[in-house]
Amino acid sequence: MYYRLLSLTLLLTNLAFLPTQSHAAGLKAGAAKIDITHPSKKVVEIPLLSRALVLKSDESTLVIVTMDVVSIGEIGSIPDDFQENVRARIERSLGIPSRNIMFNASHCHGIPSPKSEDLTVEVIEQAFSRLEPVTLRSGRAHEDRIQENRRMKLKDGSEIDVRHAYSLPANKEIESTGPIDPEVGILRVDKPNGKTLAVLFNFACHPIQGTPVSSGDTSDMTGYAAQVIEDNLDPGTIALFIQGCGGDINPLAYKDVDHPRHAEVYGNMLGLSTLKGIRRAKPNDDQRLIVVNETLSLPRSNLAPRIAELEQYRESLVNGFRGTTLNLRQFIHLTNKHNLAPDAPSYHISRYLHDEALGHEELKIMDANNKAAMNTYLGNIYRMEELTRVNANLRLLKMHQQQNVDAGKRTVDVEVMALRLGNFVMVTFPGELTVPIGLGIKKRSPHPNTFVAGYTNGYIYYCPTADQLKNVGGAQEDSDCILDPQWQEIFEAKVTELLNRL
């Protein structure tokens, strides 16, 4: 009942930030980029950048900042006061309302400079100083070769996800995998002479492919994609990657152990696919600039009951280990023998035929005993792998339960932006939205070119669907979450309202 009442009494704050709009005659834009790679990094695969696009109409100004960082505050190296500080400094220096400044994190896991705040202020000011008349084109591209949904549904009805933090279950336990969103949303900003000034491209995937060198710094596959786009358009073009609903989307073959990890291949593929869409982008039938920024109050979760259940399950796993005569070396030795020749693992088949003729069964008995010991040992391995998953997710649940208790209130306030840039429409959210959220918003939107940006204007961890949150403790997205399942209904109602206002 509490959350039903809450959903009916949402905070519609910041109403002073009413939509503003303009048409082509007054639309100007400027763009710039700046290196924010940590200066101590000796190996840099591809640098981390802050990029800024300023769009100015006769009535309002919008700043879009994209950063090659894991998040805007909360986790990673960008401090919690970064967004507030940059907004305040830009409002003082340029007069742009703070809530008209948008920050999107690519969610790459590189390490940015400790001077990222100063550098980001500088790049916004540079972009503002370069304002010139522009026209907008919008479009989309398709790329389905580089990402996979990291969630897997098991035959017992539960779900797990693909992480380096723990192992995957046996193949026989897997029933199905989840969807991806192969769409690339594109906004092309052109100068009066038809040359490109900037490009926004929106895509949903964790950019965590990494580098062949574990100590290397990288803006990952999305950094390479932006570089490909910039290198193949007019000189000076700025390509801004906007991370979408990538919470449950990994690079393809994320757990590959047979090839060095390198983001360039996937980045090149994404960049080239995006270029096709950029070149097909159609002129917008109007050039409206509409900016809406509202604060939404969402319910926090109570994770205590699920924590207690998982702790009991963990105890049952520990108590379920069985003794066996084998050690790891013996297990591998026997596994190789039995897989190579299941009917005659311990010697050539002629020995088995010889014993059978004489009525001797010593080899068969030994093989059967070894097979039973192998199955027990294998069962212990699977139990150990399950235990690592439970331990990893329990740590997340306990951390977030403490955060929710320490917060002192049962809700968390988040920014939700709605933007209309010509025919290009985007809604934003600070969490790691899973791909079903984005697919649903696109399907229901009254605007054909609607896209969704997660990781924007703050960070509140993973935000899976209400259905996925029935699986709390089974996958990272469900466990690394501070929200009650009611959050989805509240958020989507607000999105519908905002889209209808654009």
Image (cartoon, helix red, strand yellow):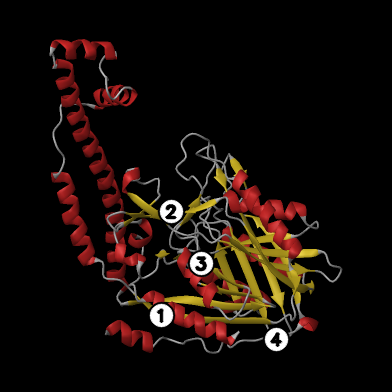
Q: Are marks 3 and 1 in contact (CB under 8 Å)?
A: no
Q: Quadrant of residue 311?
A: bottom left
Q: Which residue is mark 2?
A: 150
Q: Nearer the viewer, mark 2 or mark 1?
A: 2
Q: Which residue is mark 3?
A: 454
The quadrant in which the N terminus is found is bottom left
Left/right placement of residue 440 relative to residue 382 reads right
Return the disc, 3 or 1, that comes first in the chain's sequence. 3
Q: Quadrant of residue 289?
A: bottom right
Identity of the amino acid at label 2? Arg
Q: Secondary structure at mark 4?
A: loop
Left/right placement of residue 361 relative to residue 124 reads left
Q: Nearer the viewer, mark 3 or mark 2?
A: 2
Q: Which residue is mark 4?
A: 59
Q: Secondary structure at mark 3?
A: loop
Q: Which residue is mark 1?
A: 490
Identity of the amino acid at label 3? Gly
The residue shown at (16%, 40%) is 321
Identity of the amino acid at label 1? Ile
Query: Between marks 3 and 2, how big is the CA–CA gap?
Result: 17 Å
Q: Are marks 2 and 4 in contact (CB under 8 Å)?
A: no
Q: Position of residue 210 (x, y in %)?
A: 52, 44
Query: Between marks 2 and 1, how big is the CA–CA gap?
Result: 26 Å
